[in-house]
Image (cartoon, rainbow, N blue to C red):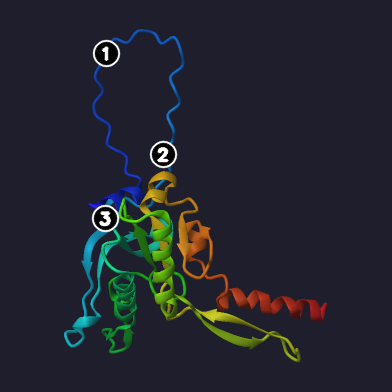
């Protein structure tokens, strides 16, 4: 049930209108109250697959991971998003371990028709358009199981347990030739963008609002900002060329 509620909250599904029934209505003496416009959603019901078991080599059965739901909405900049709905019934360690199994799956390789090694997940899903593995979003839907502080503690604990999975590897580079200062960037190529949100936030504000917490960013963001890697190699190149322009000016 919680998975269906999450999909509805993300897509902002609107009920289909029924055929109107003609009625005699007396003239209104006051203007009717304005109907609030619902927040836009992401994708449609057809964009989703639920209870998705990802195939694995027979020799490595314990690397398997079964996603609660997978969203594929390329028109919204989400070629693939793995969604886990957490109701607080498992321990922090169990949830963190599942994130670890996602990365083990994303690291698996297979042979393409030419005999070249390729990542297994790329044979089922399109590229994300961003550095790293496909993002995983954990939607916390604890209901009355957890209070606000307990939920915050759970998020912090899972974030700490999975730090090696979502944090990039820092690489130091010379900022420009002959300079004594150095700069660097983060390599996110082997990381999972791990996102947190809550079912209540999605229901109230919608998925396009600042309802996403990307581990490592330290603030609530919109989804595009949460998925961005502002400290990766692509972002470092403009920072590196800026001192060069000033030096040659």
User: 1 left or right of 34?
Assistant: left
* Residue sticking out furthest to the right: 249
Q: Residue at x 33, y 83 (%)?
A: 118
- State the image coordinates of residue 87 (x, y, percent, origin top left): 29, 58
Q: Residues within 10 Å of mark 1 (few under 14, many from 20)?
A: few
Q: Is residue 215 above or below residue 62?
A: above
Dots 1 and 2: beta carbons under 8 Å? no
Secondary structure, mark 3, is: helix
Label 1 or label 2, whichever lies nearer to me, is 2
User: 191 left or right of 90?
Assistant: right
| Pointer 2 or 3: first along the chain | 3
* Residue sticking out furthest to the left: 58
Read off the residue under disc 3.
3
Q: Is residue 29 above or below residue 75?
A: above
- State the image coordinates of residue 45 (x, y, percent, origin top left): 28, 50
The answer for how far apart the CA atoms under marks 1 and 3 are is: 39 Å
- Residue 38 is labelled as 2
> Quadrant of residue 155 in the image?
bottom left
Read off the residue under disc 1.
23
> Quadrant of residue 156 in the image?
bottom left
Nearer to the camera, 3 or 110 = 3
- Residue 82 is labelled as none
Label 2 or label 3, whichever lies nearer to me, is 3
| Pointer 1 or 2: first along the chain | 1
- State the image coordinates of residue 46 (x, y, percent, origin top left): 27, 53
Q: Is residue 147 above or below residue 118?
A: above
The answer for how far apart the CA atoms under marks 2 and 3 are is: 21 Å
> Quadrant of residue 181 in the image?
bottom right
């Amino acid at each position: 049930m919680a998975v269906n509620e999450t999909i509805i909250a993300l897509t902002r599904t609107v009920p289909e209108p029924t055929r109107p029934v003609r009625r005699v209505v007396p003239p209104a003496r006051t203007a009717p109250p304005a109907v609030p416009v619902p927040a836009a959603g992401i994708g449609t019901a057809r964009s989703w697959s639920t209870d998705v078991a990802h195939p694995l080599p027979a020799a490595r059965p314990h690397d398997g991971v079964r996603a609660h739901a997978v969203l594929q909405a390329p028109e919204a900049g989400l070629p693939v998003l793995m969604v886990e709905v957490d109701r607080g019934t498992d321990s922090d360690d169990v949830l963190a371990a599942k994130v670890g199994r996602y990365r083990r799956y994303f690291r698996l390789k297979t042979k393409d028709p030419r005999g070249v090694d390729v990542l297994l997940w790329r044979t089922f899903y399109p590229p994300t358009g961003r550095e790293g593995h496909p993002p995983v979003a954990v939607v916390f839907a604890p209901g009355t199981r957890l209070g606000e502080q307990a939920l915050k503690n759970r998020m912090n604990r899972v974030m700490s347990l999975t730090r090696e999975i979502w944090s990039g590897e820092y690489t130091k580079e010379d900022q420009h030739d002959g300079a004594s200062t150095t700069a660097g960037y983060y390599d996110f190529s082997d990381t999972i963008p791990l996102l947190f949100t809550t079912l209540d936030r999605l229901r109230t504000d919608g998925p396009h609002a600042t309802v996403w917490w990307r581990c490592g960013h330290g603030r609530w963001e919109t989804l595009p900002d949460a998925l961005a890697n502002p400290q990766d190699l692509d972002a470092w190149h403009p920072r590196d060329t800026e001192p060069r322009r000033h030096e040659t000016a």
